[in-house]
Image (cartoon, grey):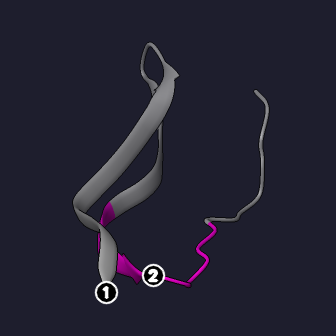
């Protein structure tokens, strides 16, 4: 049973002319009983 659906997700952060695309156009679904994590390096500027 699908409990979550994400379509075309994009996350951009930054200030001024400095933009960082952390997630670019991803789609996925999560079924009951599944676990999901988005992991990656953390960078401070």
Residue 32: assigned label: 2
Q: Where residue 9 sits: x, y (%)?
A: 29, 56
Q: Is 19 located above or below residue 34 in the figure?
A: above
Q: Quadrant of residue 23?
A: bottom left
Residue 25: assigned label: none
Q: Is 35 located above or below residue 6 in the figure?
A: below
Residue 28 visible: no
Which quadrant: the N terminus? bottom left
Q: Where residue 22 sits: x, y (%)?
A: 51, 51
Task: Please tell me which residue lies in front, 14 or 17.
Answer: 14
For the image, the number of numbered tags is 2
Q: Is residue 31 left or right of residue 44?
A: left
Is residue 34 on the magenta stretch? yes
Is residue 3 on the magenta stretch? no
Q: Secondary structure at mark 2?
A: loop
Task: Please tell me which residue lies in front, 5 or 32.
Answer: 32
Q: Where residue 18 sits: x, y (%)?
A: 49, 26
Q: Where residue 2 sits: x, y (%)?
A: 30, 80
Which of the marked residues, 1 or 2, is nearer the chain's N terminus?
1
Q: Identify the residue at image location x=78%, y=47%.
A: 42
Which residues make up the magenta segment? 25-37
Q: Quadrant of residue 31?
A: bottom left
Residue marked by disc 1: 1
Marks 1/2: CA–CA distance? 6 Å
Q: Is residue 30 left or right of residue 41?
A: left
Crowd around label 1: few <14 · some 14–19 · many ≥20 (10 Å) = few
Q: Secondary structure at mark 1?
A: loop
Is label 1 in contact with label 2 (beta carbons under 8 Å)?
yes
Crowd around label 2: few <14 · some 14–19 · many ≥20 (10 Å) = few
Q: Identify the residue at image location x=69%, y=65%.
A: 39
Residue 20 visible: yes
Q: Quadrant of residue 19?
A: top left
């Amino acid at each position: 049973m699908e409990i979550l659906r994400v379509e075309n997700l994009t996350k951009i952060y930054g200030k001024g002319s400095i933009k960082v695309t952390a997630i670019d156009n991803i789609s996925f679904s999560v079924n009951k009983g599944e676990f999901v994590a988005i992991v990656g390096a953390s960078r401070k500027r």
